[in-house]
Amino acid sequence: MAAGEEPLAGGLSNAGAVVRRGDVVDRPAPPTARALHAHLRALRRQGFDGAPLPVRLADDGREQLSFVAGEVPIPPFPDWALTDSALHSVGVLLRRLHDVSAAVPVDPGVAWPRDLADPEGGTMLCHNDVCRENVVFRAGRAAALIDFDLAAPGRPVWDVAMAARYWVPMRDPASAASVHPAGLDVPARLRLFADGYGLSPEQRAALPGVIVRAHDVCRAFVTDRVSAGDPNFTQALADRGGPERWDRLRTWLVAQHDTFSAALLGRPGREEPGQHTGN
């Protein structure tokens, strides 16, 4: 590590390869970096300040982006990252991104990554990886998104489903027990996230099924990384219960479909999201 460099933790794909130098983050550039840089600049011109700005693309396969100040929840996840207000604010931020992204044309000539992309495609560039490690908070509220490496065209509801998997989280009790407090009310938190985003009735009706499909895409993504011998994904899979966890979680998601639908489509609550963890 060179003098003046600060390693930045979080994420598996670029683990140990991201550093900060003052107001600049230096990291491996994705294959779509040029198109992504153009997109990020267009978002800022449209008034969206919740993403880093590109600084330069180097010849050595790395990129430099503006450093986004704030707190990023990384494992072991802090209690504040599981509050209702934090969850609600991620939904609000994602909707802000989508409202602006809808006005930014997607370059059809770019080979956007299919790793976590919406199988049905779409005309808006989705982030696709709004996990906890990719959200920057200020004063307990989601303020910015980072790491657009897996961005690809898709439907807004797909991006919501992918984010909900991490933030609600959409996990069966056995899978959640190792990293989350007991007693999280998943249907209520899914509703809170949808309310923060402002999902339409049609999107709410579709969301439980889209989450199952997102689960399958994420499983294929991890399986491919493990098969390729990626040590970070191999270790993470082992730490989180092995491949059997994917089967158990999918069975649970399908079984809970009607419960999730009822929570999403019921009458909205009247209270503002609280600061507590859990229900």
Image: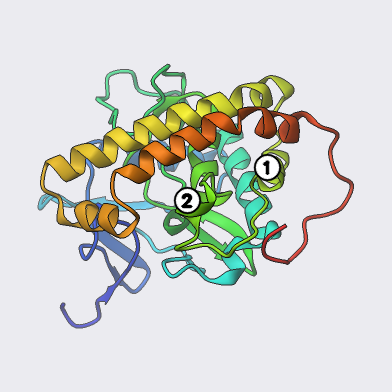
In the rendered view, does 34 fall on the left or right side of 191?
Answer: left
User: Image quarter for residue 207?
Assistant: top right
Residue 219: image quadrant is top left
Say the numbered circle drawn on residue 51.
2
For residue 66, say whether it is visible. Answer: yes
- At a point 56% along the width and 45% down the height, the residue shown is 48
Amino acid bearing label 2 = Ala
Q: Is residue 192 above or below residue 115?
A: below
Three-letter amino acid code of the residue under disc 1: Pro
- Tell me where residue 179 appears, x and y as whole percent: 47, 63
Front residue of this view, candidates 43 and 224: 224
Label 1 crowd bin: few (<14), some (14–19), many (20+), radius 10 Å: many
* Quarter placement of the N terminus: bottom left
Question: Which mark is first along the chain, 2 or 1?
Answer: 2
- Report x, y in % for residue 81: 57, 64
SS under mark 2: loop
Near-viewer residue (183 or 146): 183
What element does badge 1 sit on?
helix
The location of residue 215, given as percent across then percent down, is 42, 34
Residue furthest out toward the right: 270
Tell me the number on the disc at residue 54. Answer: none
Residue beneath disc 1:
187
Q: CA distance from mark 1 to mark 2?
A: 29 Å
- Residue furthest to the bottom in view is 3
**Residue 239: x, y in percent?**
30, 60
